[in-house]
Image: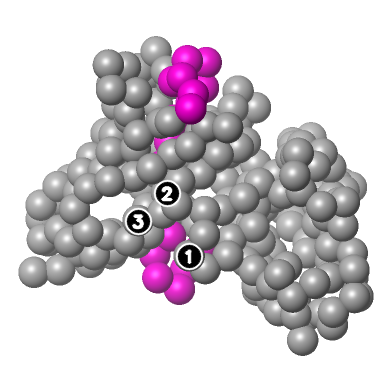
């Protein structure tokens, strides 16, 4: 069964770039979408976007100007970069595997990223 | 674009049945998926494509979809079922994943 594990800084300064990497274990990147979901404290889930294993990406319009998701075949990883962060970007970030019918069949544990000076 | 609505909370006694609804305009033709979020744990897909139960999910979890309302049913509720539940669909008109606002199921 595929396992996802996110890693990256837990504290990011305002106006900096948030960077997270998700390592995929016991599975290949092939034939799936790989994405990110976030949940601000006390709020609901927000879709950030996904990248197809071939490299094409789709993003939430509300974040499109600041976000980039990419894949690294050599390391079996995919990554999230969110630029110009503010306190509103403080959230638990989940990496996910998404099927062709766009259900999220595997999730990482979630990592809390705090934006603060 | 699709907006999905859920009740903020559902209260249920152990052994009883909990119904969590998810509704929105024009969702009748779309597949709805359900996720369980427990604190400190990775979210889990509990129902896919309106009514399919993934391997490992107890039979107590079931789903249905009629018109513009999808329903997650948890029968014979146990304390371990206390969690937040989210519905989700794919909006093909905008190519976006859409989540409902989430429902907190509290076991009394």
Q: Are marks 2 and 1 on the same chain?
A: no
**Residue A105, image x and y in percent?**
60, 37
Name the one closer to the observer, B42 or A44: B42
Asked if residue B3 lies left or right of residue A44, the reply is right
Q: Is residue B44 visible?
A: yes
Secondary structure of the residue carrying tag 3 is: strand
Q: Nearer the viewer, mark 2 or mark 1?
A: 1
Name the one closer to the observer, A20 or B98: A20
**Which label number is shown at residue B2?**
none
From what the image shows, is residue A23 above or below residue A39? above
Q: CA distance from mark 2 to mark 1?
A: 12 Å
Q: Quadrant of residue B93?
A: top right
Q: Pointer 1: what residue?
A: B40
**Residue A88 located within the stretch drawn in magenta:** no
Q: Residue furthest bottom?
A: B108
Tell me which residue sits at (28%, 22%) in the image. A75
Quadrant of the drawing holding the C terminus of chain A: bottom left
From what the image shows, is residue A63 above or below residue A113? above
Q: Kindly identify which chain the residue marked by label 3 belongs to.
A: A
Q: Pointer 3: what residue?
A: A111
């Amino acid at each position: 069964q595929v396992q996802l594990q996110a890693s990256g800084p837990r504290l990011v300064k305002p106006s900096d770039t948030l960077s997270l990497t998700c390592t995929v274990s016991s599975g290949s990147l092939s034939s799936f979408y790989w994405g990110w979901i976030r949940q601000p404290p006390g709020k609901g889930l927000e879709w950030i976007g996904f990248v197809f294993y071939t490299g094409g990406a789709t993003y939430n319009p509300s974040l499109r100007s600041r976000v980039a998701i990419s894949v690294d075949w050599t390391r079996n990883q995919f990554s999230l970069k969110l630029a110009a962060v503010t306190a509103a970007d403080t959230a638990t970030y989940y990496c996910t595997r998404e099927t062709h019918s766009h259900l999220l069949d595997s999730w990482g544990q979630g990592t809390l990223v705090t934006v603060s000076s | 674009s699709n907006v999905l609505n859920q009740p903020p909370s559902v209260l249920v006694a152990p052994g009883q049945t909990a119904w969590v609804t998810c509704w929105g305009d024009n969702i009748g033709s779309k597949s709805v998926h359900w996720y369980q979020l427990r604190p400190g744990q990775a979210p889990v897909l509990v129902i896919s494509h309106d009514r399919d139960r993934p391997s490992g999910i107890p039979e107590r979890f079931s789903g249905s979809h009629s018109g513009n309302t999808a329903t997650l049913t948890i029968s014979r509720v146990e304390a371990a079922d206390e969690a937040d539940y989210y519905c989700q669909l794919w909006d093909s008109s905008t190519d976006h994943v859409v989540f409902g606002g989430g429902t907190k199921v509290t076991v009394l």
